Image (cartoon, grey):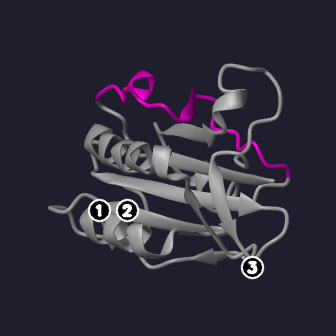
Amino acid sequence: MITLEILVDHVTSDIDVASLTMGCVIDFTMKSDRLPSLWQEEIINTHKNPVLIHVIDRYFAGSDGMRWLWDDIEEENWRRFRFIKELEGDFENLVIQSIAASATGRIWVMTDAQFGPDKKVLRPRREAAYLSYYRKFGLRLNSAIQLVKDNHTARRSSS
């Protein structure tokens, strides 16, 4: 199965996941849903004062069971995926809200799949460029990318 997690660095305001149709769980324990996780040691554990958002199928929202994405996405040959049309706007809204909630203007978008390409840390992108890229190509499986608010400087490390 596929997981999508968004790490929001230095959260200073609320992220209104209740306004979204897609399933989201905000986690303060900073534990990835995937075991073993591709990104737990390399990215998640290296940040202070972050919040981890698990983006999950709407069917699983609010449940205590496994949290993953499958029914709410369209997977492409175990290389990429995108949200179904009904949820594409929600994903973009979540990215925008998450970056706005970060005092540093930085978030990480991380995907993890049992099957798929080798893991890859992509070069940092500005928010608008990333959303444009997502609209064309979707999300790469087993990837992590740092997104930066359009008026901040992109950096690979956290502050």
Amino acid tagged 1: Glu
Q: Residue at x 70, y 29 (%)?
A: 59
Can residue 156 be spotted in the picture?
no
Task: Check disc 3 and report the residue beneath it.
Answer: 117
The dot on residue 147 is 2
Percent position of residue 24, x then y: 56, 33
Q: Residues within 10 Å of mark 3 (few under 14, many from 20)?
A: some
Nearer to us: label 1 or label 2:
1
The dot on residue 58 is none
Q: Residue at x 75, y 37 (%)?
A: 67
Nearer to us: label 3 or label 2:
3
Amino acid tagged 3: Pro
Q: Residue at x 44, y 51 (%)?
A: 88
> Which residue in the rendered view is the most extreme toward the front?
85
Q: Which residues are magenta?
A: 13-35
Percent position of residue 53, x then y: 54, 38
Q: Mark 2 or mark 1, which is nearer the start of the sequence?
A: 1
Q: Mark 1 or mark 3, which is nearer the start of the sequence?
A: 3
Name the element at disc 3: loop
Task: Check disc 1 and report the residue beneath it.
Answer: 127
Q: Residue at x 29, y 62 (%)?
A: 127
Q: Residues within 10 Å of mark 1 (few under 14, many from 20)?
A: many
Name the element at disc 2: strand
Viewer-nearest residue: 115 or 107: 115
* Residues at marks 3 and 2, CA–CA distance in whole angstroms: 21 Å
Our reading of the magenta stretch's main secondary structure is loop
